[in-house]
Image: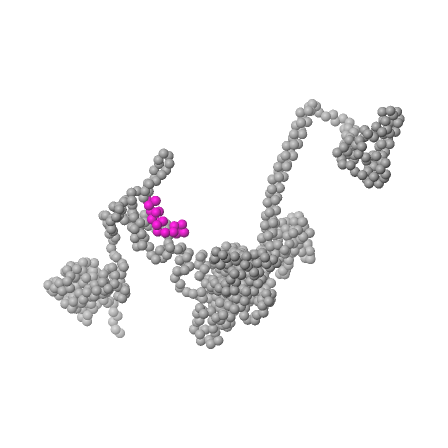
Amino acid sequence: MAEEILYGIGDILHNGNGEERIIAVEQDFIITCDLNTSKLKFHQYALSEFTSKLITKEISVSKDIDDSVQVVDFNNVPPKYQEIYRENVSRVEDFINSFGPTYIDFGKKGASCRSLAEKHNISMKGYMKIITKYFQSGCHTNVLYSGNTTGIRKGCPKNYSKKTGRKGKYHNYTCIIDDTVKEYFDDAINSLLKANKRWTSITDAYDFVIQKYYTEYYTKDGVVTCREVPVEKRPTYRQFYTYYQKHTNQLEKDIVKTSLAEVRNDKRIKRADTMYGVYGVGDLVECDACEMDVGLVRMNNVEQSTGRPIVYCMIDVASRVIIAVSISFENNSFLGITNLLLNLSDDKVEYCRQYGIDIDPALWPSNIIPRRIRFDRGAENTSHKLEEVLQRLHIERELVTAATGSLKGNIEQQFRQMHLAQNKVLEDLGLIEKRHDSNHHKEAILTIEQYTKMVINFVIAHNQNPDLSYNLTRDMIEDEKTDTVPINLWNYWNSVAASPRPITASNALQFRYDLMLAYTAKINNEGIHFAGGHIYDNFDDNDLQMLKYQQGDRKTNFEVRYDPRNVNYVFYIKENRLCFAKINTDKQINRGFTNLTFEEMKKLDSKKKQILAVNRQTHEEVRRNRDSVNRTVVNSVLQDSTGNYANDKDLRSNRELEKQDVRYSNSIATRLLPENLINIPAFDAEELLGNSSKKQICDDRSRDETLEEKDVMNMTDEELEEFEEENNRRLNHVL
């Protein structure tokens, strides 16, 4: 068995007296040179002695790489430094030829070494510096490059006593970039990087330095004012700019030019593609919404514009098949996403037939429940409502980093293609263009139903159109039946990987139930009290009616589900069976609330609360005014009161007398007496009484005129009494 080699050229020897670099390993000896010294000195060790001491651990050897050794691309080195390198190599080769391989004679032949320096037209000191650097590095030729070739300058920064650079043409600048000024510059650069949305240029950062560190504040006439220090004593913009260029990398410069979000989205380092961690169809889908650049009109009135539609789309990452779409006016809405999820469970043949399109079921595969859905960080995607729905469906939600739409590039690309497809046919027909003469809303002709038909046609075409950017694997290439057509890729992945969870007739009801929102309602003998106090009931459910009877007026919790798109029904589970309760329109609180959305109901309830709040204020004002008037009445009576207590004797007879007076004052007769009819418009007495006009009781003449006709003043007492009885009798007849 060959002896294991424990050392080699470039290793460091530790002998107790210092460190040495092994520079040569010959058959019988080893050559080293001293480290950590500017004077070059060589040592020779017999191989057997060296090995023995190494085994007995009298000496030790360690692996080490000198930091001064750099990796250099010779072709990228400027020609000037290439020449320096070649010259240094020639100087080292001459030294090796003169003193190698043992180098024992070095130092004894100083004249020869000096002659080598003279040969290469260099000083003795400079020549030995090159040779020493070469051997102490472990005989690496890369150290023979000039330090400027790698862009790395070693050592401490220089301390200047006066300003560097060219002199000012109009000012004698004296500001030196010392450690203090560097701290000022670093502060400005850090602020620039952190607040780049507020600061838009390097000039702003420079102004920050001057305003913060080179501006003096003082009070004059009670007013705080400021002034900058003389221009000669403050750093110039060129000084700051040079420092900024040297102390920021390209990433930081790009952040200043644009923004961190834009750099992260457009210029990030890509380690993998969208297929990373994807194991088949339905494993990961991308979901997003886009406001399309087209104006629409109402279905019932094509002369009224409705604005831009919102297209929600879901695409399978493994196959690039679009598995669900939804077109509505729900922008950044939870309803828009649930519309899209509902489309997953729709029969696509029947769905397309609603819009007059007949398709082969194989062209639009869906009816699956994906394992993961990737969203952006929109408010609707990060909501707790969506999280609850996805948890019930056992779907994992993935949220990409903010402002990084490229992390879901498949769906973003489809929206771009969708825009290009519609732009070809909708120019001057509602297409929204960035032109000064664009009248897209006035030119719109499509309804949302017609535009949906266009989107469906796009989906069918996309699922059959080869994806030229799709990266086929080796297995796909060897499979002669596989190409980059999305529908074919869908079939391929279904054959080689596990199929996703299907939506069938047996679980479709459960799927739709899980999409509804949960709500803790109240129930009592009136019914189910849903949002805003609206009452729902199911009179066909005897168990529910019995529960209402048992509750009485007491309200208890009752778990229901509801669809925000329609408030007509709420749903509940009874004995593992889905039941529904309908809004009770027999209750006045529910009248006019049918066929509304939940948002519309909330708006009306909010308006009702506003009305009640105003009424509550009015109620309080009226109550206070009532009490004030009552106090005025009481106080007025108190002023006229004698202060004596009322006589409580003969209470019953007094009450009867007072009752008769009150009855007489409230009688109809008192309201019809002539003195009370002065301001009453005239009426047809004959029509009223159904008798001849001879009945003068309802005539508009006064009582005095009637008495004058009978010459009351000349009547006897008997005649007067008879006359009054006749008058009263006629009056009673009228009444």
Highlighted magenta segment, given as a residue range = 195-213
Residue 199 on the magenta span: yes
Magenta-drawn stretch, dominant element (helix, strand or loop): helix
Residue drawn at the location 48% of the way across and 61% of the way down: 374
Front in this rendered view, residue 58 or 37: 37
Would you identify the image quadrant in which residue 721 lies?
top right
Image position of 47 with respect to 605: above or below: below
**Vertical comparison of 723 with 352: above or below:** above
Query: Which quarter of the picture shows residue 7?
Result: bottom left
Q: Would residue 93 be visible to someone looking at this image?
A: yes
Asked if residue 528 shows in the view, the reply is no
Taking the magenta stretch, the answer to whether it contains residue 480 is no
Q: Looking at the picture, tell me which residue is in the foreground, 245 or 50.
A: 245
* Foreground pick, 342 / 360: 360
Percent of width and height locating residue 133: 20, 61
Q: Residue at x 62, y 38 (%)?
A: 620
Instruction: Residue at 53%, 68% (x, y): give it.
Output: 460
Quarter of the image with the N terminus in it: bottom left
The residue located at (45%, 63%) in the rendering is 409
Q: Where in the figure is residue 467, as x and y percent of width and height?
A: 47, 69
The residue nearer to you, when weighing 462 against 367, is 462
- For the image, the number of numbered tags is 0
Horizontally, residue 197 falls left or right of residue 618, namely: left
Residue 638: percent from left, percent from top:
67, 26
Residue 14 in percent (x, y) is at 22, 61
Quadrant in which the C terminus appears: top right
Coloration mode = one colour
